[in-house]
Image (cartoon, rainbow, N blue to C red):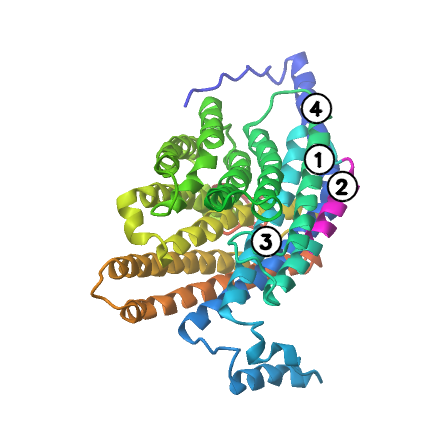
């Protein structure tokens, strides 16, 4: 990394020294006031998005645990008298009873409804909303102007969560579309599109009134993500449900959207956060602006094609699948450029991982992103896809990217943003530690169980002499590992929700310093308070 020249400071006895120090002090004070004004203008809308995202995170995690148990015990919570009686016990304490429509023969809690409802709650209720909040806060901070047109954000929050409610109830009631990532009924999808469009319009309005100065790489990623998502969502719904294309083209449109949601919305938002928080915490600029722009354009050019790898082996043009395989390989340019930038920016400052919650979450998420991207390129190869396609292996990769990469970066961003919005520090470093380690261990176990299960499942399915029921038996032990991993993740999410609630009500004593996971080097070297050296 190139060194930066530092202008000489006038000696203390020089008449200009006081003037130089006064200018620096005023700049610092002006910058602090500017940031405080921006945070105050965004306090309510951003906290609303974070709060509802946290609620959907818990709900989705719980549904996925239930769905995972059903893979081993199909009658769990449905289809048996003991299940219905078991559910009525806690309701009976409240003087309530389970509605008849939730009985075993209704299907409300069958795997085919619980799993998509839980997955979409995580993808749209948690991931998309957390992304909106982080993108909004970062855009205002980098544009250096307080939020304007806040009714757009309040309306977006209300419309989006209305769509989430209608969509989730629709899927559980059996009105889902059975199209992965687009399971919600069309009336719910309309609400989601309007909510995303309102956030996009707000970002354009703010960007136009930004303070003069250079554009930061995070602004590139945020602006692109907030414009790409409504376009992807509207186009996919239009050509799959309203103006259906030819059946042979439905698959490419579907996977163009499904992969695009991850590649062109979640990934840019998470990387925008990483490009902001890593330099901010380690106290140095991004290693190479040129590398970050190279990464951006590699994502924009190759990202939309990666979804075509999901069509391997299907009745689709060979060139289409080949284009997806090539794009998945070329995406490694994006991954390598991003990884080099983050690593070089962190060089010599890895000790901050010990004490900074934000940096720990973000760096782990960025590391998982590299691992998941290499796995995606590996999965795209035809010889590999022939084995792992249509197996648990693919779902394991999706969980890794959503919970291991994206969610970890969002957790880190929340650790940094919320104290500045609330003017209050996190009440418990212990809860943050539990949250971190439970989620990391849960995601690791979940990914490992599904990857091993999928590989064994793929080998067995490609062997004609092995019956399908035998293949299912091979995966039983791994499915329990999947359930255990999801339970650990749910426990971690409960710890996070508890921290967020305590923070929202300003629980605990007033803290004069940030809530850190360990002492900083300066604190370790400092003499104990009250000693002569300290005085």
Q: Earlier in the sequence, mark 2 or mark 4?
A: 2
Instruction: Measure the alpha-carbon separation of dots 1 and 2.
Output: 8 Å
Q: Is residue 176 above or below residue 385?
A: below
- Image coords of residue 233 (percent x, y): 59, 43
Q: In percent of the image, x 49 and y 60: which residue is there?
A: 434
Instruction: Measure the alpha-carbon separation of dots 3 and 4.
Output: 31 Å
Q: Secondary structure at mark 1?
A: helix
459 and 400: which is toward the camera: 459
The residue labelled by disc 2 is 152
Q: In percent of the image, x 61 and y 77: which residue is there?
A: 102
Q: Earlier in the sequence, mark 2 or mark 3?
A: 3
Q: Say whether residue 510 is visible.
A: no
Mark 2 or 4: in front is 2
Q: Earlier in the sequence, mark 1 or mark 2?
A: 2
Q: Say whether residue 73 is visible.
A: yes
Do labels 1 and 2 touch, CB within 8 Å? Answer: yes
User: In the rendering, which numbered label is found on residue 201?
Assistant: 1
| The magenta segment | 148-161
Instruction: Measure the alpha-carbon separation of dots 2 and 4.
Output: 21 Å
**Label 1 crowding class (10 Å Cα cut-off): few <14, some 14-19, many 20+?**
some
**Label 4 crowding class (10 Å Cα cut-off): few <14, some 14-19, many 20+?**
few
- Image coords of residue 85 (percent x, y): 57, 86
Outermost residue toward the top? 15
Q: Is residue 345 above or below residue 352?
A: above
Outermost residue toward the front? 246
Q: Earlier in the sequence, mark 3 or mark 4?
A: 3
Magenta stretch: dominant secondary structure:
helix
User: In the rendering, which numbered label is found on residue 211?
Assistant: 4
The residue labelled by disc 3 is 126
């Amino acid at each position: 990394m190139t060194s930066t020249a530092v202008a000489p400071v006038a000696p203390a006895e020089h008449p200009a020294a006081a003037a130089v120090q006064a200018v620096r002090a005023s700049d610092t004070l002006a910058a602090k006031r500017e940031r405080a004004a921006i945070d105050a203008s965004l306090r309510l809308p951003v906290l609303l998005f974070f709060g509802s995202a946290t609620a959907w995170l818990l709900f989705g995690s719980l549904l996925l645990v239930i769905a995972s148990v059903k893979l081993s015990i199909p009658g769990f919570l449905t289809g048996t008298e003991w299940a219905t009686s078991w559910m009525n016990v806690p309701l009976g304490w409240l003087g309530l009873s389970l509605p008849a429509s939730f009985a075993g023969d209704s299907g409300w809690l069958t795997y085919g409804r619980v799993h998509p409802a839980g997955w979409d709650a995580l993808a749209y209720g948690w991931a998309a909303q957390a992304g909106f909040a982080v993108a909004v806060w970062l855009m205002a901070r980098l544009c250096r102007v307080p939020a304007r047109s806040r009714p757009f954000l309040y309306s977006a929050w209300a419309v989006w969560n209305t769509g989430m409610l209608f969509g989730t109830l629709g899927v559980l009631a059996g009105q889902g579309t059975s199209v992965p990532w687009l399971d919600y009924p069309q009336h719910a999808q309309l609400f989601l599109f309007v909510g995303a469009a309102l956030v996009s319009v707000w970002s354009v309005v703010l960007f136009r009134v930004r303070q003069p100065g250079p554009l930061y790489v995070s602004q590139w990623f945020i602006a692109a993500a907030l414009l790409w998502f409504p376009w992807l969502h509207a186009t996919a719904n239009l050509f799959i449900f309203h103006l259906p294309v030819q059946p042979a083209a439905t698959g490419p449109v579907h996977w163009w959207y499904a992969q695009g949601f991850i590649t062109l919305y979640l990934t840019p938002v998470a990387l925008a956060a990483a490009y902001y928080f890593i330099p901010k915490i380690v106290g140095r600029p991004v290693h190479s602006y040129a590398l970050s722009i190279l990464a951006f354009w590699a994502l924009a050019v190759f990202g939309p094609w990666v979804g075509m790898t999901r069509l391997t082996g299907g009745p689709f043009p060979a060139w289409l699948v080949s284009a997806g395989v090539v794009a998945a390989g070329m995406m490694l340019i994006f991954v390598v450029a991003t990884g080099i930038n983050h690593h070089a920016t962190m060089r010599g400052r890895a000790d901050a991982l010990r004490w900074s919650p934000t940096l720990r979450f973000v760096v782990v998420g960025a590391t998982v992103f590299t691992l998941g991207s290499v796995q995606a390129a590996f999965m795209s190869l035809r010889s590999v896809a022939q084995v792992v396609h249509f197996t648990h292996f693919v779902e394991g990769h999706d969980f890794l990217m959503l919970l291991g990469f994206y969610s970890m970066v969002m957790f880190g961003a929340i650790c940094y943003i919320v104290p500045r919005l609330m003017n209050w520090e996190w009440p418990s470093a212990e809860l943050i530690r539990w949250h971190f380690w439970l989620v990391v261990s849960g995601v690791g176990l979940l990914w490992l169980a599904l990857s091993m299960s999928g590989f064994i499942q793929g080998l067995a399915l490609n062997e004609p002499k092995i019956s399908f029921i035998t293949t299912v038996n091979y995966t039983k032990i791994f499915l329990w590992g999947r359930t255990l991993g999801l339970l650990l993740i749910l426990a971690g999410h409960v710890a996070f929700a508890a921290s967020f609630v305590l923070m929202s009500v300003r629980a605990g004593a007033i803290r004069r310093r940030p809530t850190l996971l360990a002492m900083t080097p300066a604190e370790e070297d400092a003499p104990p308070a009250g000693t002569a050296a300290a005085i």
